[in-house]
Amino acid sequence: MTLTVLSVASEVFPFLKTGGLADVAGALPGALQSHGIGVRTLMPGYPVVMAGIDPGAETVWSDESFFGGPARILAETRHGIDLLVLDAPHLYERFGGPYSGPDGVDYPDNALRFAALSKAGALVAQGALGGWRPDIVHAHDWQAALTPVYLAFSNAPRPRTVFTVHNLAFQGTFRYTVFPQLGLPDSAWSIEGVEYYGDVGFLKGGLHAADAVTTVSPTYAREILTSEGGMGLDGLLRGRGDRLVGIVNGIDTSVWSPETDPVIAKTYTARTVRERRHNKRALEGEFGLRREDGPILAVVSRLTWQKGLDLVAEIADEIVSLGARLVVVGSGDRLIEGAFLAAHARHPDRIGVRIGYDEPMSHRVQAGADAILVPSRFEPCGLTQLYGLRYGCVPLVSDVGGLADTVIDANFAAQRAKVATGFVFGPVTTDALLEAVGRLLDAYRDDAKWRTIQTRAMAFDVSWTASAALYAALYRDLLNE
Ligand SMILES: Nc1ncnc2c1ncn2[C@@H]1O[C@H](COP(=O)(O)OP(=O)(O)O[C@H]2O[C@H](CO)[C@@H](O)[C@H](O)[C@H]2O)[C@@H](O)[C@H]1O
């Protein structure tokens, strides 16, 4: 049976991306096609998205007064994605990023901006686009979390709903005063609705209202049931019982492929992995690093407490004294940015730092560095270690969430069983991180051992194949209930 899905997300690669959500929302629809599932994707009409819209795109819905101004939905297929764009200039036509202005401060009307996205999702789900009604609505993260809430509190027939939480740390909590502007019935101001300790909780509402909740790895799905990992929502999540499942992310292996990647100096496969040296030389040039025999360790990330990168900054001198070099691409916390810039100033030809966001550079780093460091304090899934596996940029990760589910530590047993794909450490401390860096450097010095880990990493299946099948099965289970 052909099944139709409406996906609602605030970011979709390649139209707009600030993090991993965009990669998932951009790649999952294509992966579901082979399961007979057709996905339409609704996202906000941010300026960069509107700039790329085909002038001939069809207006499939409009409203003169939608959350304070005129709005319409434009439909077009772009980059193979069946896209619905919510064009509402009073909400989305802003200077700055999707969530905050150039000053880094959140827009004061974010509650309305994303209530509007969610409401548009609910309207489409209930037939606003003429005859089209999806079988399933799949909403992502707090920005779309009210879609299942609007649907749960509507009296009209509605499709089944799935809500995916990519990161429990971002909850979309707003003052209770916004509640009357959301257009929800009074009954939604309750523990069954969006009320959250006296405020409005978008994420909380979605986690409660959706027919099924997923998160992006089995280990994270367990971690968020504990008071340490639940960020205040563990009680609610425990109450969802078997309605909460963890499905590990895949990656778009057509975008992330060392065999065909157009932005790297030299393409390669596991068989020709020695060709990576050309990419390493190019990376040294790009970052002004001294040419040496030792490995290049790399970071591509938001520089935040979650990602544990303060620990990498702390051991930067040791990394250099152990004979390795470091490349960092990222932005975020000013203190962590400053710590990396200071480390670069101390070792200008051994530590390269780019503060900023640069998608092509992230490919060149994965293709040219020897190892990617992901020492997160918590990590729902993590995508950079998956890119690392695919590119033979051996991952060194902490033993949490999706990192633990996707990397096999090169310990004695794993090496003997021929399954090791990287290095895993815990707890998340500088001592444990340094110990793992030491093990990685030992392995790097043993050429045969390193090649074995590297090529096995490249053979690990990081595609969407297995996980798309799990989403397909979940959708069908919901429809069969
Ligand atoms: N400076 C920079 N330049 C270029 N590219 C950069 C960059 N900084 C980050 N990126 C890219 O942004 C993405 C980040 O994805 P992650 O999954 O690592 O984390 P994020 O916390 O955003 O996502 C959340 O959602 C995803 C998706 O479910 C989960 O995997 C994750 O655990 C969860 O925290 C990667 O594609 C990475 O390459």
Image (cartoon, grey):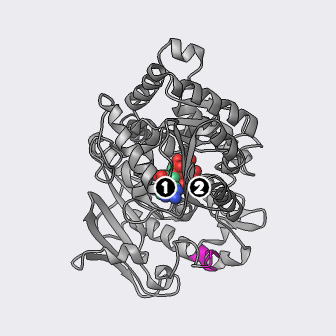
What's the residue type where badge 1 is placed?
Gly
Measure the alpha-carbon separation of dots 2 and 1: 8 Å
**Quick one: label 2 or label 1, which is nearer the N terminus?**
1
Viewer-nearest residue: 368 or 404: 368
> Residue 60 occupies which quadrant of the picture?
bottom left
> What is the secondary structure assignment of the residue under circle 1?
loop
Assess whether residue 61 is covered by the magenta stretch. no
Which numbered tag is attached to residue 164?
Answer: none
Viewer-nearest residue: 49 or 365: 365
Name the residue rendered at 48%, 87% in the picture: 69
Q: Position of residue 366 (x, y in %)?
A: 44, 45
Q: Position of residue 12 (x, y in %)?
A: 41, 60
- Left or right placement of residue 388 versus residue 194 in this view: left
Which numbered tag is attached to residue 348?
Answer: 2
How many numbered callouts?
A: 2
Which numbered tag is attached to residue 288?
Answer: 1
> Residue 102 occupies which quadrant of the picture?
bottom right
Regarding residue 162, the answer to whether it shows in the image is no
- Left or right placement of residue 55 versus residue 364 in this view: left
Regarding residue 188, the answer to whether it shows in the image is yes
> What is the secondary structure assignment of the residue under circle 2?
loop
For disc 1, the neighbor class at 10 Å (few under 14, some 14 to 19, many from 20) is some
What's the residue type where badge 2 is placed?
Pro
Name the residue rendered at 39%, 67% in the picture: 124
Q: Position of residue 8 (x, y in %)?
A: 44, 61
Viewer-nearest residue: 386 or 436: 436
Magenta range is 103-112
Q: Are marks 2 and 1 in contact (CB under 8 Å)?
A: yes
Name the residue rendered at 42%, 41% in the picture: 250
Q: Residue furthest left?
A: 56
